[in-house]
Amino acid sequence: MALDIEALSIRFEEQLRQVAVADSPFVTEVAGHLIAAGGKRFRPQLVYLASEFGGGATEEDLLRAALVMELTHVASLYHDDVMDEAELRRSAPSANSRWGNSIAILTGDYLFAKASILVADLGTDFVRLQAQTFTRLVQGQIAETLGPAQGEPPLQHYLQVIADKTGSLIAASALFGAMVAGASQEIQDALAAYGEEVGLVFQLSDDIIDITSDVTGKTPGTDLREGVPTLPTLLLADSQDPADQPLKDLLAGDLSDDAALVEALTALRSHPVIERSRAQVRHHASLARQHLGPLPDGEAKQLLLQVCDDLVERSA
């Protein structure tokens, strides 16, 4: 690989902190809150890797593309936490719990605006793609809030929600990297399709981890306790086996009590829906790998394939 990703990542963190600086010290503090809390920086890394399949990009344009994607992601987190009434984000108090909903929403808007300023320097095609991605993010959040329409299968609804809320931005990150490096349309299409599937794998593996893992840093059963639909619970709800009714009733009840939550987690961990969920993760990871077919072999492609393997492994 020609890129020095480690050096790029250092410059990226410096610029990410700087771009959040506002005229007001208070806005600077709130806007930098989640940035300072860290994160995987998966989307910027995907921008870098995807750029390896083009003819080359300037370091400044590559960093600009990575910043746009991460700022869009972080801005959406401020809004998500308000919608979810979340108290924590990345092990730190959420902005809404610390400064209130109005400040959190406006800070998300501020970071979206900062991303828009940066993307304008990349050109109209990038502006259009970011706007299309933002449209899907918003539609996904609205669909999640409303729930399935009458007659719409809940699992189908859920998969579309996570495609819009998670897959769209991951796909855009891969596409930004390819576009900024001048990759062919075939390569761009392949990377965008890969990103869509990886987004599904990412969220579906998280769904499993919420139930099965004690070592991820996330409290097990958080989604269960809050009544958030996930792949395992949706598969269970779809079951016609009368033997599953007691577990369905338990999940529909009050899980604020620790003993009830432990009982629900124990029952789910040994239930066939967990293995069925893992099969779904493996299926979408396989589709993601297939989309990489047109890409030339090399270290960048191997790293993209490794992403699929790692996501499958984390939920195994």
Image: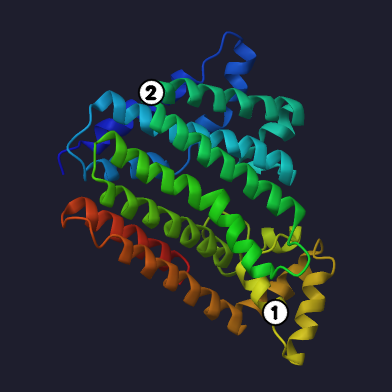
Between residues 231 and 255, which one lies in front from this camera angle? 231
Mark 1 belongs to which amino acid?
Asp
Q: What residue type is labelled 2?
A: Glu
Frontmost of labels 1 and 2 is 1
x and y percentages locating residue 314 in the rendered image: 44, 64
* Mark 1 burial class by Cα count in 10 Å: few <14, some 14-19, many 20+: few
Distance from disc 1 to disc 2, alpha carbons, whole Å, reads 48 Å
Front residue of 262 and 193: 193
User: In the rendered image, which quarter contains the C terminus?
Assistant: bottom left
State whether residue 90 appears in this view: no
What colour-coding does the image apply? Answer: rainbow
Residue at image location 54% in from the left, 35% down from the top: 74
Tag 1 secondary structure: loop
Q: In this view, does 219 lie to the left or right of 228?
A: left
| Residue 244 image point, x, y percent | 73, 86
Question: Which residue was labeled with disc 1?
Answer: 238
Q: Which residue bears the numbered disc 2?
A: 14
In the image, 60: left or right of 133? left
Q: Quadrant of residue 41?
A: top left
